[in-house]
Structures are given as C-alpha cells and as structure tokens.
Amino acid sequence: DAGVIQSPRHEVTEMGQEVTLRCKPISGHNSLFWYRQTMMRGLELLIYFNNNVPIDDSGMPEDRFSAKMPNASFSTLKIQPSEPRDSAVYFCASSFWGAGGNEQFFGPGTRLTVL
Amino acid sequence: GENVEQHPSTLSVQEGDSAVIKCTYSDSASNYFPWYKQELGKRPQLIIDIRSNVGEKKDQRIAVTLNKTAKHFSLHITETQPEDSAVYFCAAPRESGGGADGLTFGKGTHLIIQP
C-alpha cells in the first residue's frame, strides 16, 4: 500500500486566492482526519470523518475553511479566501476504526505558503 | 474536550542515557494514549501506544507508563541513540472514548541526543 497520499506537496499562493488540498486515505480505512501544524500552535485537529460523514469540525478556524469527503477514497480541504496566517503544514491522516484499531497513519503533508 | 500538557519542551541527553517525557490529560474518560515521533521535515509516525486497561507497555528500548488516577502518562527511551533525535508528541482522544476520534496533541518535546 502506498500509504496516505496528499497533493500538492507544496503550494505557494497569494492572499485572497482559493486553495484546495487533496487526500487519498489508505484503502480500507474508514476514518479520515485533517490536521494543521505550525510552530506557534503545534498540531491541531481541524476536522474528521467517519465513514465519509463529518463528525467534528469544531477545529476549523473559520468559515473560510471547508472540507468534503465525497467517497471513501478522497477528501479535500479548501480555503477561500486564503490569508497569510493560514501558512502551515497540513496533514491528512487515516485509520481503521474497528476492534482495537486506533493508529492514525499520516500523509506526507502539504506545505502551504500564503504571501 | 481534552487538554494535553507535555514536558519538557526540549530534552538533551548523552548517547546511551535514558530519556523520559511526561504528559498530563484532563478527560478522565480517555482510554487511548499514543506517542508519535516526527523527524525534521517528515510526517508524525506512531512509535507506541497504550490503552487504559494496562499500566505499562514496552517495545524494545521504548516503554510507556500510564497512571489513570493522576491522569498522566510517560514515554521512556533507554540506551538512547543518535537516530532517536526528533520531536516527540503525546496525544489523547479529542472526545471521550478512544474510538475513531481526532487526537489532541501535546506541544511536543525536542529530544537531542548528544554524542
């Protein structure tokens, strides 16, 4: 298995532009998580899905952020409009929620820079 | 929601010595506690986890202990080696249960192994 796949790996954009981050979870996993990592705030949970259904989006900073999971093998995180303070590394992680299963496997991350 | 505190923020030890990192959590219902290791520029990767029905778990040079009464858990690394240098994060489920919940992470400990 290729593991969790994220694209793009790096994104540089200008303030006000729309940014879309993509994630393909590990095949067979039924939970997907979006995290953001910055020096100041560390690793923060933004939103997570179980069986493609959003469970908790209380970590989404504001209405400029939205996430979707149209099927079990794809999720997007969108920022519109982007701002410089959104600059961070965004990680997608997936796990199999079942008997004893909890380990979250992280993707390589997308490094976002908003100028 | 869960609140996780991690100490110290930086830890420097001589190669071959032991390292201990401590975390506290706030939600007494939490029952799953993972530790992640993140090397510079890489993704977080699970190194060990523990559930609340045991007090200690060991995997070669790494061990985790859990004190549910005091609501704290610790990571122990023995016979440290240069490749142990990284940032280590503790975590606990964002909501009670330990199922397919997003994780609340500690702020991280930068472990430096001195040759």
Image (spheres, coloured by chain):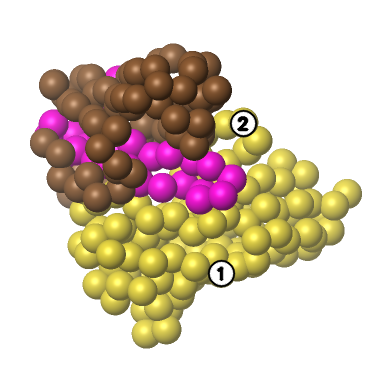
Chain colours: A brown, B yellow
Q: Residues within 10 Å of mark 1 (few under 14, many from 20)?
A: some
User: In the rendered structure, which disc, 2 or 1, sits on the residue that comes first in sequence?
Assistant: 1
Whether residue B11 appears in this view of the structure is yes
Front residue (pair A59, B23): A59
Q: Which residues are magenta?
A: A24-52
From the top left corner, tell me how far across and down residue B107 is, in percent. 54, 57
Task: Check disc 1 and report its element: helix, strand or loop.
Answer: strand
At 40% from the left edge and 71% from the top edge, which residue is drawn?
B25
Residue B69 counted in the magenta span: no
From the top left corner, tell me how far across and down residue B104 is, in percent. 38, 56
Residue A44 counted in the magenta span: yes
Q: Nearer the viewer, mark 2 or mark 1?
A: 2
Q: Is residue B33 above or below residue A42?
A: below
Front residue (pair A81, B2): A81
Q: Amino acid at mark 2?
A: Gly
At 55% from the left edge and 23% from the top edge, which residue is drawn?
A115
Q: Is residue B60 above or below residue B25?
A: above
Q: Is residue A41 left or right of residue A51?
A: right
Please state, as top left, top right, bottom left or bottom right, where the N terminus of chain A lies in the image.
Answer: top left
Q: Is residue B83 left or right of residue A72?
A: right
Front residue (pair A35, B50): A35
| Residue identifier under label 2 | B41
| Residue identifier under label 1 | B22
Give how far apart the Cα atoms at labels 2 and 1 are. Answer: 24 Å
Give the chain of mark 1.
B
